[in-house]
Amino acid sequence: MRQQGTSSKKHHCNRRTPKKVRLIDFTCIEEPHPYGVLPGGNRFFRSSAASSSTTTSTSSIRNTNILSDKLWQHIICFCDGSTLGKLIQVNRYLYVNGHQPELWRDLVLRKCYSGIEKGQKTISKVGLSWKDTYVFLIIDNKDDKGNYKPHQPMKITGIYSDDIYRSHLCRSFAIPSQWLHQMPITKDNDRKKKSNKKIDTVPEVYVQDITPQQYFVQYEERNRPVIIKGAASGKACEKWKNWNYLMTNKPNIDASTTTKSYRATSGAAPLPGNFTLKAYHDYTQSTRYLEESPLYLFDRNALTTNKEWEDDFFPEFYHKCPYWNPSDPKHGHDLLQHLGINERPDHTWLIVGPKRSGSIFHIDPNATHAWNACITGRKRWIFYPPGQPPPGVFPSADGDEVALPLSVGEWIIQYWTEHMEQYRTRPVDQRPLECTTHPGDVVFVPHGWWHSVINLDDSNIAITHNYISRSNLGNALKFFAGKQDQISGCRDRKETIKPEYIHDEFVRVLKVKEPKHLEKALQQTGWTCRAWEEKKLELKHTQQQDDENEDPFRSSRRSACNNDYGNDFSSKNSNKKRRIDIDGERDDSIDKIMNAEKQELTSVMSKTERVSAFSFSFL
């Protein structure tokens, strides 16, 4: 059908705010495709005056179906930078297809990757596009004389492609105005009345209105999400608005290291990338044409290596929320701390991302709870209860893998209508929950809950922490004992306790430090969270294989089910799983096969090849 225009955007976006967000609310894209691509149906609406002989020739060539858009994308993925640069000069169609940002992003990330032992090259300069960044990388960032002219997209007429336009729609979808509203602060005696109006929204409480006991009983022990408003407000929320403050702050790094780099990833990227903070900021603010699933910083060392950042946030946060303070002996919080700060799995991350970046649906690793503090920008959260996978999410029988769309935009366009149907058809306790967190808010993410997060502003900064307390200790011990191949965050650092030993070591230290909590947890006979169930895996596996034969989409996209923010990637090689740890570091059991030359690093261009149900009929 026809592309949504500016007038249509005004028509849809200015109407009275509906109770529910509809699929059409996402189609008010901010700008047209930078290279002029239109959905396939638009070829039937072009005027005769615009139909030049060249356009007709292009259409006739495309209609022969000798090489489809999908097949061209497969072919182009094998090109190196030099070959791709020549290919885009062949004709108008290849010019457009060869400038998709995912292609050049993958070239940059692979160019920076030097193997497991050598590490990765830091990206210290980015251009207005991933193509420019690739050029800077090739010339080693030494072109400071202004000799290089940035790439300027040319509008090409007569290119009609649902496959190419799909990526643009998924990277440029509109942010519904309903997601951006914040409930005004009212008088103290009115707060609780206004916090639980709808059963399909995450409840909100103000930090001064909730005690540690209320938090444990009403939310953590019941395994229900909640937003603690004002819990993260303080120095960090004010100081971190200023990127100059963040970029000029000097982290505590080794003397041999001159520049601190931060790790960035996404669910669709073949490899993580290392950026300087300035380069990443330029990427989010200056790059004109971000990819469908933008890279976001997800760094486990950012706070531990920067004392000033740590002091900006944690003292005030722990004072307001003592139930999340590991050093407070009253509450028995974060039992993993007893393993030792270096021996425990990774647990605290700094997260930074641009608008529309975020995490695909996942369950937090190791059967842990989590809290996520919103420092700058707003985030939209979508939750599904344990054991109730969202539409389009197909976990394997053992929970080790999941087939799902690889970007939040694709999930929205593909499954939003079905998602809205869940509110009407599912029982109340199985319905999804949604919420928007604003700066200063902290959301509690219970263990076993499916959740996806979408950044709503141009600059979003958050801190997240995964933990085990007495409320989920029994399930965590069962996870450590029975799902060692899914344990994350402890494979790439030599000092961490490895998966095969973590259960016994955890039990050993808890016998000394928390004997009462351990005794109660060991009395637990089965799973108390429906995210994991006792089933006969052989029968389930057989059913899964039958399902995949019926629906090839299920087997076309795989990533680890128990990952965090889409950072684990899995693939099959002679029925042997390959895994990358939660923080993107390599599993020491697969070092020998994860060399840059041998590893199968698939581009997003081929990962998103099977979207049989996708349609532009709503445009």
Image (spheres, rainbow, N blue to C red):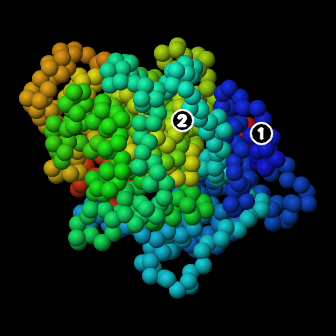
Going from the N terminus, do you reach mark 1 or mark 2 first?
1
Q: Amino acid at mark 2?
A: Thr
| Position in image of residue 42 (x %, y %) | 79, 49
The residue pinned by badge 1 equals: 14
Q: Is residue 390 left or right of residue 166?
A: left
Q: Is residue 356 above or below residue 146?
A: above
Instruction: Name the secondary structure under disc 2.
Output: strand
Name the quadrant containing residue 561: top left
Q: In the picture, which quadrant includes the N terminus?
A: top right
Q: Amino acid at mark 1?
A: Asn
| Position in image of residue 197 (x %, y %) | 57, 20
| Position in image of residue 195 (x %, y %) | 53, 23
Q: In the picture, which quadrant includes the C terminus?
A: top right
Q: Is residue 555 above or below residue 580?
A: above
- Distance between the alpha carbons at the discs numbered 1 and 2: 21 Å
Residue 100 seen anywhere in this rendered image of the structure: no
Q: Residue at x 80, y 62 (%)?
A: 55
Residue 246 seen anywhere in this rendered image of the structure: yes
Q: Is residue 336 left or right of residue 432?
A: left
Return the mark for residue 436. 2
